[in-house]
Structures are given as C-alpha cells and as structure tokens.
Amino acid sequence: MENTPEYVIEMLHITKEFPGIRANDDITLQLRKGEIHALLGENGAGKSTLMSVLFGMYQPEEGEIRKNGEPVKINDPNDATALGIGMVHQHFKLVDVFTVLDNIILGAETTKFGFIQRKEARKKVEELSERYGLKVDLDAKVEDISVGMQQRVEILKMLYRDNEILIFDEPTAVLTPQEIDELMNTMREFAKEGKSILFISHKLNEIMAVADRCTVLRKGKCIGTVNTADTNKQELSNMMVGRPVQLEVTKTPAKPGEAILTVENLSVPSKLHKGDAVKGVSFEVRAGEIVCIAGIDGNGQTELIYGITGLEKTSGGSITLCGKNITKSSIHNKSAAGMSHIPEDRHKHGLILDFTLEQNMVLQRFKEKRFQNHGFIRRDAVREYAEGLIEQFDVRSGQGPVTTARSMSGGNQQKAIIAREVDRNKPLLVAVQPTRGLDVGAIEYIHSQIVAQRDEGKAVLLVSLELDEVMSLSDRILVMYEGEIVGQLDPQKTNLQELGLYMSGAKRDSEEGKQ
C-alpha cells in the first residue's frame, strides 16, 4: 500500500470566535488532491472565515491544519503561499493604479542585482495566460479593466506563485453568464492537472455543475459532506437552510394599472468616454407589474438607474413619477415623490458603514414625527422600529440593532437595505441586483417580498444580471445593449437562448419586421 495521504489539506475541529459570535464551531474539512470541493452555506454561515483561517488571515482558537498528513502552522498569508495555498478573495486585493503585470508579480518578484526581472516575469505570465485561456492585457491599469478581467488577474496571481491549493471565495458573484462558464472550464482544467480547489459558493447550479464533493455549513457548524453526484439542489438547499426552500418563484399573472414611472428619450452621460452611456431610452412601469432591465454588465443599466434616482445628472429626455416631472429633482425630492431604491453598490449608496444598523434603518425617515420630538431623535422609537425590521427580514448580526453596519456580512447588509426600502412603502420600488450575494433562503424571502409589493399595486423596476431571476421574477423584460433598449420580451414566451441573443446584440426588436 502506498503511503501517500488521501488528503492534501485537512482542517480538523477548527473553532474561531469573534465578539458575540462563534463563526466556526468545531468544523472539519478535508480536501483531496485534484478535486473541486465546494463549501456551501448561507450568508454568515462561516465560509469566508474558515477559508481566511486556512489562508493565515485569522488564527483559530482550537483545531489544527494538516498538509499531506503533516500538521502545519499558518501564521499569515506568506506562510500559506509558502505551503502552496492561494486565494481569490470576494473583494479583490488589487492595486488600482498598477498595471496588470505589476499586480501579478507584486510580492513575488524575481530580482537580479536588486532589479526586477520584468522580461522573465512577463514571459511566465504570458505562458500561464495562454495555457489556461486567461487572456488579459498586461499593460492595462487595473482601474481600467472590467471586474471579470480583474478576477483573471487574481487567478494568474495564484498561478504565478505556483500554488497547488486554490481557494475561490464567491468567485462568480460579479461575473456575466459567459464569464461564469469560462471560469468553470478553467477550474476543471486546474483539477485535471492535479491542483486542488476549494470553491465557496451559495449558487446551487454552479456547485452541481463543477464540484466533486460539497461540505455544507450552517450557522458556524458543519452539517455534512456529500458527493455532488449523489445529491440534488433541493437536498443541498435543505442542508444549507435547515428547511425546505422553494427554488421557483410562485406568482399570479400581473394585473397592471396606470403608469407610475414614465421615462421618455432619456440620455445619461458616460463617465468612461465622451458621449452618452444611455441613449434616448423610453419605457414605462405600471402599478402592479415588475419590469426587469436585463443585459450584460456595462451596457448602461447602472447609468440609467443613476439618472432615474438622481445619482447622476441626465443629458436629455424626461422622467415622470406619479404624474409629476422629476427629471431635475434632487435625490431627496425624487424619494419623497414616491420612490424607494435598493442600490447596486450597497457600500457606496446603500449604507453608512460606520453607523449602527438602527441608524441605517431610519436614514431617510428620521425627520418623521414618530422618530423625533422637537428636533431630537427618539432613540426608543428608532430602536423599536429597527428591531421589528430585523426580526421580519431575519437580519443577522453580532449585536442586533447596535451592530455597526461595516462589521456585518455582505448578505446581511443587503437584507437591511431591502428591509428599509420595502418598508418605506412607496408607489415605485427600484431594485438593482437585490439578491446579489444572498443565499437561497434569503433569495426566496426577498423574491416573495418583491412579488408582494407588486400585488399591493406598487410598480417595481428591477435590474438584474442573474438570468434565472430575470426569467422567474419579471412580468416584462427590457433588454439593454450599448445604452439602448433593443428588445421587449415576455418571460412566459421567451427562453434563455433568445434572451442571450438580445443581450449580446445579435438580435434586436426593430429588425423583426424584416425577417
């Protein structure tokens, strides 16, 4: 019998605590050589914490890590790199003003007489990028490339350091469907070559498509490890959430009423180049319907919403909300005229990160009579209001309403924003990527809330890059391509293939008469 150990990495009985929370509670995870092993769990289940322990960013209170059967001590990420462990983080760790090449070799430069051997480094990176189909422009600055490209840079960074154990933390959260397929193929290539992959995700389709085995965490505890070939999405979601989850949206047909939002010939300038990012777009959203704007990221959806909500100035056209022209109104007045907004960038536009959860819950409402008395905020009323929303939307945090927003997991920050905006009860709800970074249990709840808003007669304008969400949640789909609306589709009568053709610009409504 050969004495090569079965597992390349073992994390045995790991416990990690933070104030008010046991993030990892006696977790054991074993990774085989050459396998893709998924780590699945709800937001805040402890997935990223466990991987940060393996990468040396946190020290566990209990437990040990073994590599090839031998105990190892990982004090910091440099120790992890020396052991051949690499990690692509959920929020990339890149230097914006450096070039792609400099980012890849940063900290692992080969030098000769104190000079960086750029030529050799470039050659090695080019070979890696060719071999794995990870094409990037080595001389571009990171701040000028797309998020999908930045991720390739992170992957090349790992490969450049000859890492054998690759950790991917929520790698698909910001990618387009095409980029996700490419990433999955890259992972399969790595595994074929004998590299071992830990893949953190809460997207069941991806896990079923690419992982050999899956370990499920729930509230910091390990629920079990299963072979993906022997399980299904329903079983995995039950393990993850602890109850049966509805993976499909249930809703009755829409009964649209009067137009709540009317957008006519709207143009919004681009920040990236001269000219407009949104070019003469017109549509309306009626009471009692969910209209979804679909498209590949970067086709003007963000700027369109910025123009409508007031985050950017428009360069032409008009916006009418509840019969009132709000084209030039301030954000505050647009909001007061009847608009709630779940923004795309939760850190920049959704929360004040150093405020507490309860302060964030009343950001637009603290002037209301119920929350103030002669100009002083009634803290008891704010606390009571926040506690109600926290319970209703299952917002989890270490210290309840007094937790600072910054210290919460991304998914729980998102739930807090959704709770606040849905509860404001305005005629128009603008929801941009409302379930980005959320797990199946939370997605099920948010979807039911959005449908409930529609059924109460609200108009919902949804922007989503998740095609499953677009198909299952919307009553009408508008596809944006290069700043224009190129198609209007009925989700009941279209399919993902047709939607993809519109999104890539291969098909447009105006051409249908010619066929």
Image (cartoon, rainbow, N blue to C red):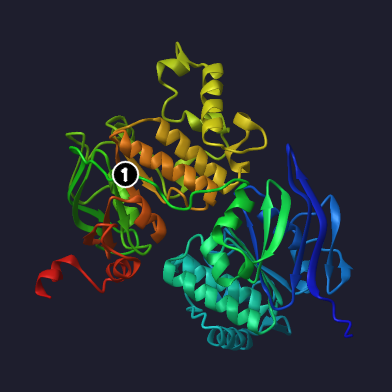
Q: Which one is in front, 293 or 494?
A: 494
Q: Picture quarter containing residue 177?
A: bottom left
Residue 142, x across and y down, in percent: 50, 68
Q: Picture quarter containing residue 107?
A: bottom right
Q: Residue at x 56, y 43 (%)?
A: 412
* Left or right: where 421 falls relative to 100: left
Mark 1 Cα shell of 10 Å, populated few (<14), some (14-19), many (≥20): few
Quarter placement of the C terminus: bottom left
Helix, strand or loop at disc 1? loop
* Left or right: where 435 falls relative to 77: left
Residue 466 seen anywhere in this rendered image of the structure: no
Residue 163, x across and y down, in percent: 70, 76
Residue 246 seen anywhere in this rendered image of the structure: yes
* Left or right: where 52 falls relative to 268: right
**How many numbered marks does the figure carry?**
1
Quarter placement of the N terminus: bottom right
Q: Picture quarter containing residue 236?
A: bottom right
Residue located farthest toward the front when viewing the structure as drawn:
230
Residue located farthest toward the top when viewing the structure as drawn:
374
* Whether residue 471 is situated above or below residue 404 in the rendered picture: below
Q: Which one is in front, 336 or 458?
A: 458
Residue 458, x across and y down, in percent: 29, 36
* Whether residue 86 is situated above or below residue 22 in the rendered picture: below
Residue 405, x across and y down, in percent: 58, 39
* Whether residue 6 is situated above or below residue 312 in the rendered picture: below
Q: Residue at x 51, y 83 (%)?
A: 133
User: In the image, what residue type sits under mark 1?
Assistant: Thr
Q: Which residue is mark 1?
A: 252
Q: Which one is in front, 470 or 195?
A: 470
